Image: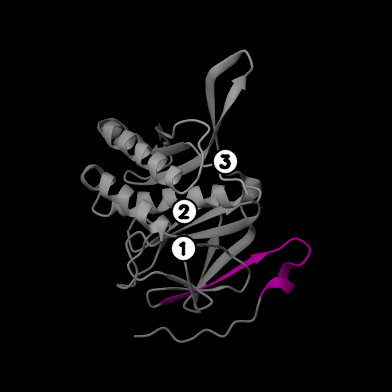
Amino acid sequence: MWLETIENKLRSIFEDTLDRLLYPGASRSLSSQIVALIMEQIEAQPEGKKKAPDQIQIFVSPEKWDAWQSAHDTLTKAALELENSLSAEGFRFKHQPQFNVLMNPRLDIDAIEVKIGYTQDASPLEKTALQPVPWQPSEESVPINAYLIINGKEQVPLQKAVINIGRRSTSDIILQDPMVSRDHAQLRAQQGRYILFDLSSTGGTIINNHRIHSATLKPGDVIRMGKTILVYNQEVSGLQDATKAAVILPEPEE
């Protein structure tokens, strides 16, 4: 419940600026990604630790770089909201949360990529110097021979560290389904697995009959977005085809 509260507060802060800067619904997509990635970092900590990440990096296209400079006050307000909300839940920050906007020339004009991590002191002699340590995708982190089967017909290879799924024409995987949100879900590669994040979609994301906010995908997982059925598979080292589950697909509804 408190996760949804934080997400809604961030969305409210982002709404006027980002929906004007990018497109209607951008605030929902960004707030959902931020909360999901923060929880991923928190859940990776040893049991009993309650340290919250304090670095949020937002990568934007060169075409939108100048426009994003006008969002400075909005991002400062969002950082303060994160600090207050997570502190109220008992999480500690080593440093005050900070948003940084960076340019990625590979991104489409309205695309956003988010990375989250912790700052650490550069050296004992430079105690005031901070260095962001976000999750960095690499070729090695992308699962081997991973793919989705869409509605039992189309096989789509998954070859990128970050894959956006939705109805939007700029999505990496476009689903022509009116029940699917424009920015419905995102796949992120980590340590040879894909993690699927629901981006606060209207209809939600269902995996094996369970609604999820985020989940690590396993071969044979059946994913439902709107009326679209997707089956995930990948080659697991040492097992290869033996890991591929036999799945009987339900017929998509008309």
Query: Which kind of residue does numbered mark 1 sit on?
Result: His
User: Residue 213: which disc?
Assistant: 1
Mark 2 / mark 1, whichever is N-terminal: 2
Select label 3 or label 2 by which is in front. Answer: 2
Residue 248 or residue 45, whichever sits in front: 45
Q: Which residue is mark 3?
A: 136
Count of numbered circles on the image = 3
Query: Which kind of residue does numbered mark 3 sit on?
Result: Gln
Q: Residue at x 62, y 67 (%)?
A: 218
Q: Is residue 177 left or right of residue 132?
A: left
| Disc 3 crowd, CA 10 A, few/some/many (<14, 14-19, 20+) | few
Quarter of the image where the C terminus is located: bottom left
Q: Residue at x 35, y 41 (%)?
A: 81
Mark 3 / mark 2, whichever is N-terminal: 2
User: Residue 143: which disc?
Assistant: none
Give SS at disc 2: helix
Q: Residue at x 52, y 84 (%)?
A: 249
User: Residue 36: which disc?
Assistant: 2
Give SS at disc 3: loop
Q: Is residue 169 magenta?
A: no
Q: Residue at x 23, y 53 (%)?
A: 24
Q: Position of residue 110 (x, y in %)?
A: 32, 46
Quarter of the image where the N terminus is located: bottom left
Q: Position of residue 85 (x, y in %)?
A: 39, 46
Q: Is residue 242 above or below residue 147?
A: below
Residue 63 or residue 29, whichever sits in front: 29
Magenta residues (range): 228-244
Q: CA distance from mark 3 to mark 1?
A: 22 Å
Q: CA distance from mark 3 to mark 2?
A: 16 Å
Q: Is residue 244 left or right of residue 62?
A: right
